[in-house]
Amino acid sequence: MASDPKETGMRSFTLRDFVEAGRERLCLDVVVGGDGLMHEVLEPMCNRPGLALTGFYGCFAWRRLQVIGRAEQAYLESLPSGESMARFKALFDRGAYCIIFANGRKIPDGLTEVAAAAGAVVMRTDLLTREFFHQSTFVLEALRAPTVRIYATTVEVAGLGVMIEGAPGLGKSETALGLVKRGNALVADDFTCIRKDVATNALFASAREATRNYMEIRGIGIINVPKVFGVTAVRGEKRLDLVVSLRRLEEVAGELDRSGQERLTRNILGVEVPQITIPVSAGRDLVNLIETAAQQYKLLASGYDAVKDLDERLCALSEAVPGGQNTGEQNG
């Protein structure tokens, strides 16, 4: 079994990573500074440098990506000829390394030379400024999020993200296939990529891009899940709610809490995820057990605890019978 991944902190990434990750969402076109795309994004946020363009640099967020919107463009166009280039040069001199023109604006004459001399990158997008800010937030957040890969299969079961882990040969993929046939959905087979949302402290599971939607089943080979079972049989990403650890019965004999009262968790990227261990032996219906485990977890999350409920019931029956005997003992 894979060892518990620990908190790794924020990831670093480059402007090239940003362009690639936002290829479809941000519609970015690199105009100047292709070589500068290897520059690390120092602060994963966008900034509108309105005040800095007027000459006030006291609070200039130069570590962020600078976005020129309609207001900034209008101001620059109001300046005397050549003055706008001096304003851009002042931004570059104070550390700015990337400028993005929104609204499909034309790059001003002369900026190409000024940016190239500073080693900066200039891009443009047809998106409106507010839309670019909105979409870029998702891209930047995904790029900086801590991630880890775990040898496990993840399935959406009863609306929950359930990661199934265990040693090779225990039937993780076959169990996931059975769950998919029962109307659940595959997230990732064999390897699961976990992303931490630092804003909500939640974990999200997905497949590697190269193997997304595919499963390897011993004796059958590679199958394309949406082609076989339909597009509703897969999920691109799912919040991770529960970890199911499959272990051989002989390995856990005597260790399991048969009542289910013990609450285990699995630490992934600093987040504690509820975990259960299911012993594997010949004849056990793992598909049915994992579906039941997911439903049980939903009840626990809603506040209902079967163990506590049964304990209260037995206590009530014991108090109702003279001598502390329960009704079953009395009838016996």
Image (cartoon, grey):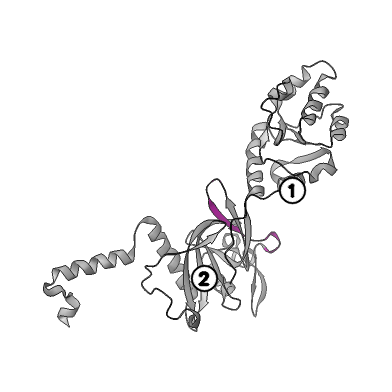
Q: Nearer the viewer, residue 16 or 21?
A: 16
Q: Does 62 appear above or below 149?
A: above
As shown in the figure, which amino acid type bears the numbered disc 1? Asp
Q: Does 328 appear above or below 86?
A: below
Please identify the quarter of the rendering in which residue 45 is found.
Answer: top right
Residue depicted at x 71% and y 62%: 210
Residue depicted at x 49% and y 72%: 287
Q: Residues within 10 Å of mark 2 (few under 14, many from 20)?
A: many
User: For residue 202: magenta?
Assistant: yes
- Residue indicated by mark 1: 17
> What percent of the width, then of the height, locates residue 21?
71, 48
Which residues fall within the magenta stretch? 199-211
**With 241 as the anchor, is 211 left or right in this view?**
right
Total marks drawn? 2
> What percent of the width, then of the height, locates residue 172?
57, 73
- Residue indicated by mark 2: 245
